[in-house]
Image (cartoon, helix red, strand yellow):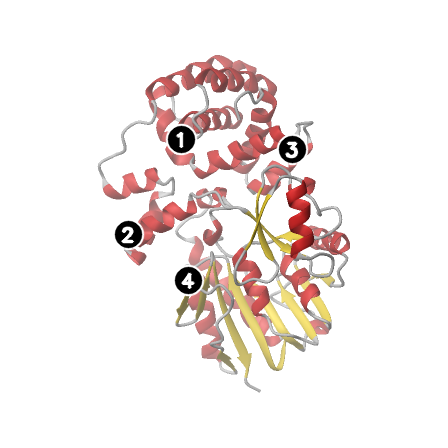
Amino acid sequence: MKGQGSAARAAAARAAARVEAGQHLPQALDQALRKTRLDARDRGFCTEIAYGSERWRSLLDYSLKPHLRRPIGELDPLVRAILRQGAYQLLKLGLPAYAVVDSSTEAAADAGVARARGLVNAVLRRVAEHGQPDLPKQEIEALALRHAHPRWLVERWVERLGHDAAEALLMRNQEVPPLVLRLNRRRTTRDESAAACAAAGIAFAELPGLPYAVALHAGGDVRALPGFAEGRWQVQDVGAQAVGEAVGQAAFFLESACGRGTKTLQQAERQSGRVVGVDLDPDRIREADQEKLRLGLGAEFLAADARSLPPDVFGADQVLLDAPCSTLGVLQRRPDVKWRRQPGDFARRSALQTELLRAACAACASRGTVTFSVCSQEPEETMVPVKAVLADGGFALLEDEPPCAEARTEAGFLLPGMFMAQLRRLL
């Protein structure tokens, strides 16, 4: 990464500023990259520092604090981003100080905050000279900083899981994951995709337990990878693919609150009957329709409220609800999420998830199955909605173990980064 220019750093700073304004990191970075003419190497570097500085944000702030005259939160968002990303390059990537300081200083001008060039230069020089400060002696505070998580979340996990299991979770969250794809079984095979990746010099690995999952060690823009334009694959994590593979065969499959439709399109590959996805957000429905065309799959996408599903989607014999959640199970891939969450979020989300699950159950046909999943393993978002629906009567919990299951709970299964439960309608 030595020798990377200021343009990549400026693009990463713009993405980080959008994240602080409320945008999700993948979308913010995609928008920032679309407005640049960076080559593949620079795009990969931009992605690395954008994600890495979010992953280590609190520890980077702690390392910057002794060298700032005012709190980092009072700085211009672009200046704050350039400082964090510079500190990340120095402390975590170990890049040469002269290259990081000079390019970060120029990035301030490229990003439109030239007035801060002197500040960026001086602060990053001091960080390079002094390194990371000693951590506090207080155990929870030190643990939270060492692994760059909000203190309240670390306290929660230590109380629920114990110190060692909580620290193992924190360490796992900080790992950089491979890019996991679901091969489009209608358009390619493992051998074809492996050959295409080998020709492009990309490491390709099969994943056990999932028939169409592969892992790539590749950075940069996924749209530039072999097979994207031809619709031969879709990005989808291991846990999400496992949920989709656990869904039974159906004459009519419905996904409630389908988002951008990834799991719906997975079923369009697997199922021979009608496949429908419903989501409240018309922009997400448009994205799902575009993906459907790219992948060459047959699925219907409808814009509707999943809390009150339209009558024409009732009677599905397989219903999937991947409910909106805290997404704390996928912090490896979504490090910005941990800085958004607050302790009160869980109760609010649990109430919404229960409402959505009841609506999904209402749309399920006689003897049909509802699959409930969340990319979280927090009790309020897993056990509470499932137990509430079981208490309503009319459904029973299935105990068939899904692919890649890590543990069984009293209300379902833990998967990599996810929770899943399946409910069978009794009558």
- The residue where tag 4 is placed is 380
Q: Earlier in the sequence, mark 4 or mark 1?
A: 1
Q: What SS does tag 1 mark?
A: helix
Secondary structure, mark 4, is helix
Q: Residue 170: where, in percent of width, then height?
A: 37, 47
The label nearer to you, 2 versus 4, is 2
Residue located beneath label 2 in the image:
164
Spatial CA distance of label 4 from label 1 is 31 Å
Q: Quadrant of residue 244?
A: bottom right
x and y percentages locating residue 344 in the rendered image: 41, 53
Disc 1 or 2, which lies upstream in sequence?
A: 1
Foreground of the two, 169 or 178: 178
Tag 3 or tag 4, which sits nearer the N-term?
Answer: 3
Q: Rounded to the nearest whole Å, what is the CA distance between mark 1 and mark 2? A: 24 Å
Q: Nearer the viewer, mark 4 or mark 3?
A: 3
Q: Residues within 10 Å of mark 3 (few under 14, many from 20)?
A: many
Residue bearing the label numbered 3:
33
The amino acid pointed to by label 3 is Leu
Residue 116 in sight here: yes
Q: Which label sits on residue 60?
A: 1
* Residues marked 3 and 2 touching at CB (< 8 Å): no
Task: Give the position of the C terminus as an image quadrant.
Answer: bottom right
State which mark lies toward you, 3 or 2. Answer: 2
Q: In the rendered structure, which disc, 3 or 2, sits on the residue that comes first in sequence?
A: 3
Place of residue 363 in the rendered image (x, y in percent of width and height, measured from the top left): 63, 75
Mark 2: few/some/many CA within 10 Å (<14, 14-19, 20+): few
Where is residue 125 shown, x and y percent of the image? 41, 16
